[in-house]
Amino acid sequence: MKKAINSKKAPGAIGPYSQAIEAGGMVFVSGQLPINAETGEMAQGAQAQTRQSLENIKHILEEAGLTMGDVVKTTVFLEDMSLFGEMNEVYATYFEAPFPARSAVAVDALPKGASVEIECIAVR
């Protein structure tokens, strides 16, 4: 059985998908763009975009009764790998050891012209 999880503190889905789905004690959070749900504005710069994407994830996890400490895997999508250092600096402030497994990849483009998008998997 699967259950949709949605937080009003994170931007709504811009297509036919859920912010997150819980199944089998795992929560799969869709890629979060760096958009502030209150203002609809996109953060500017790799560090601010990383922070906003992670804040969106944090809000969705809170809706599921979880924390960033429950995250076991993240995938970071970057507009350009030259942004890795700036992203990593902010990313490190959201997690403690043992850190989640992570992949970071450069992509050709991200929705709405974002430079950073982050998705994750958390476990109860």
Image (cartoon, rainbow, N blue to C red):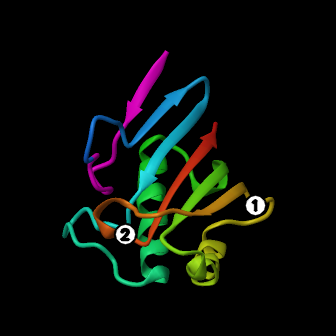
Q: Position of residue 95 (x, y in %)?
A: 67, 66
Q: Position of residue 33 (x, y in %)?
A: 38, 61
The one of 63 and 34 positioned closer to us in this rendering? 34
Give the mark nearer the N terminus: 2 vs 1: 1
**Residue drawn at 41 percent across, 45 percent down:** 63
Is 27 situated above or below 93?
A: above
Label at residue 114: 2
| Number of callouts | 2
**Residue drawn at 47 percent across, 40 percent down:** 64
Range of magenta residues: 1-13
Mark 1 lies on residue: 99
Residue with the most extreme left position: 39
Mark 2 to mark 1: distance in Å? Answer: 25 Å
Three-letter code, disc 2: Ala
Crowding around mark 1 (Cα neighbors within 10 Å: few <14, some 14 to 19, many 20+) is: some
Three-letter code, disc 1: Phe
Q: Quadrant of residue 25?
A: top right
Residue with the most extreme front position: 108
